[in-house]
Image (spheres, grey):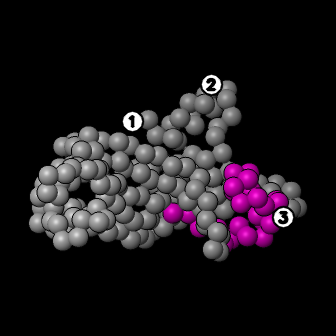
Amino acid sequence: MLSHLAVAGLAFVAGLAPRPVTYDPETKEGFVDAAEIRDKFGWSEATLAARAGSIAFTHDFYTDDTYTVSCGKESFPVVFHHDYGYLALTRTIARETSGYHPKLLGFRITGANAGVSGTTVPPLAGEPCPEKGRGGEKITRSHLDKSVETWALTASSGTASRRLMVVRVTRPAGHKG
């Protein structure tokens, strides 16, 4: 799998401008251009300069599993939010080094420094039926059909947050890895 950093490097070699956001989800490293943050938050250069120190980045992740669940004789799909969490990312502010008023270039993401994750139990036979209006019925059968793994790079400032990148990978049931 080609990382976003490698793609940006190839674009540079090919003479194309790199994307404003480069991020490798394996190493949790990358770069976010100042223009991307200004665009996502609707800020001026002055506002970004004033808030740069408070901008935080996270690597968010979750897995949604789709099951075919049977209650009695009826079967139906159930999407189950299975795995979830986030990693707080370490970042440094990149500034132009020449001139009296150095220009804010962006943010270097240099890895994860903390995180929270969790998981929940999938729908199992014998548990209450998850479909509304089936009062008292129990699950008679549950079969995993697919998993959709999602990760996102998110920037936050105060109570506002914006997704900078989102990647979804769909895996069939029984896939390992």
Q: Secondary structure at mark 2?
A: loop
Give, as a single range, the part of the protein colored magenta: 34-58
Residue wearing tag 2: 14
Q: Residue furthest top?
A: 14
Q: Residue 131: where, in percent of width, then height?
A: 28, 62
Would residue 169 appear left or right of 98 to someone viewing this image?
left
Q: Which mark sits nearer the N-terminus, 1 or 3?
A: 1
What amino acid does circle 1 point to?
Met
Q: Which mark sits nearer the N-terminus, 3 or 2?
A: 2
Q: Residue 55: where, in percent of width, then height?
A: 64, 68
Q: Residues within 10 Å of mark 1 (few under 14, many from 20)?
A: few
Would residue 68 appear left or right of 59 to someone viewing this image?
left
Residue 133 falls in which quadrant of the image?
bottom left
Residue wearing tag 3: 46
Residue wearing tag 1: 1
What amino acid does circle 3 point to?
Ala
The residue sitting at 64% across, 57% down in the picture is 107
